[in-house]
Image: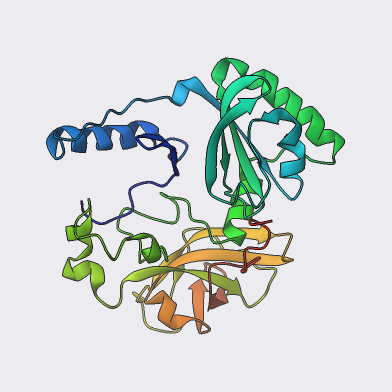
Amino acid sequence: EDGFIYDDGVVGRLAEDRFHVTTTTGGAPRVLQHMEDYLQTEFPHLNVWLTSTTEQWAVIAVQGPKAREIIAPFIDGLDISNEAFPHMSVAECTIMGVPGRLFRMSFTGELGFEVNVPADFGAAVWKAIWERAQSMGACLYGTETMHVLRAEKGYIIVGQDTDGTVTPDDSGYGWAVSKKKTDFVGIRGLKRPDLVREGRKQLVGLFTKDPKDVLEEGAQIVADPNQPKPMTMLGHVTSSYWSETLGRSIAIALVADGRAKMGSTLYVPMADRTISVEVTDMVFFDKEGGRING
């Protein structure tokens, strides 16, 4: 109700009255508890039941330009062409002979699918997908690779790029909040004067003036590195990586009035030197979204 970002995930509608809800990796218990609390205290009149199915499903993410080609032989009862199954689609189908759920979604910015099968079949399905993927030149990717890919696309990590005081608008996701609904959880919080005032910290991208400089996460940002101490801090670096695709470093930061500072130069004072940075858009790669919609 406070208007701050609590968690993130995807809500897939399987039927008129049935939904599959995902959360961040460790967020499922608290999100379920939060929803259950609201169901019992605020909306007891609703005919709604919440059930944790975390242990029931094994999920295999297949990402990249050949993702559709890799999984196609294993999917029955579903047309997964781009036209029939566009980005952010979900459907129940048969996967290697067992009932499954297929999500077309991506945290990498690439064409992506998340294959959901009953947990008991997870290892067998993973092995089959991996064997086919290997034959097509694919590789396994870990969390560090995923973090770089998501940062290149400006996708945030709740708890890393947010700190419990960030609103959807602060993060650049104000478009996701309905402008038509007269009531929803959080609407009163979002209207509080402090949450709509000028000068709030907003998520932006940063390019170091020297492309080889990789900023330290948590490093503070100032407008004038020569100002007397204690300096006025404008914000801090939330995510920072070397991008092999771009051939340079990239970073995401929370900066006061960040969007109004696009193109301006700010500074990151370190113990041994001061690093100059340019404020940029958060999407560093494939701004048009051609890869994810391929």
Q: Is residue 219 visible?
A: yes
Quarter of the image with the C terminus in it: bottom right
**Displayed quadrant of residue 114:** top right
Query: Which of 184/154 is in front?
Result: 184
Q: Residue at x 48, y 55 (%)?
A: 156
Q: Position of residue 2 (x, y in %)?
A: 21, 54
Q: Is residue 223 visible?
A: no
Query: Which of 215/294 is in front?
Result: 294
View extreme (top): residue: 120
Q: Position of residue 161 (x, y in %)?
A: 44, 56
- Asked whether, in this view, residue 238 is left or right of residue 228, the answer is right
Q: Residue at x 14, y 33 (%)?
A: 44
Count how many numbered circles sit on residues in the image: 0
**Displayed quadrant of residue 118:** top right
Q: Position of residue 89 (x, y in %)?
A: 54, 46
Q: Is residue 106 above or below residue 288?
A: above
- Asked whether, in this view, residue 181 is left or right of residue 145, the answer is left
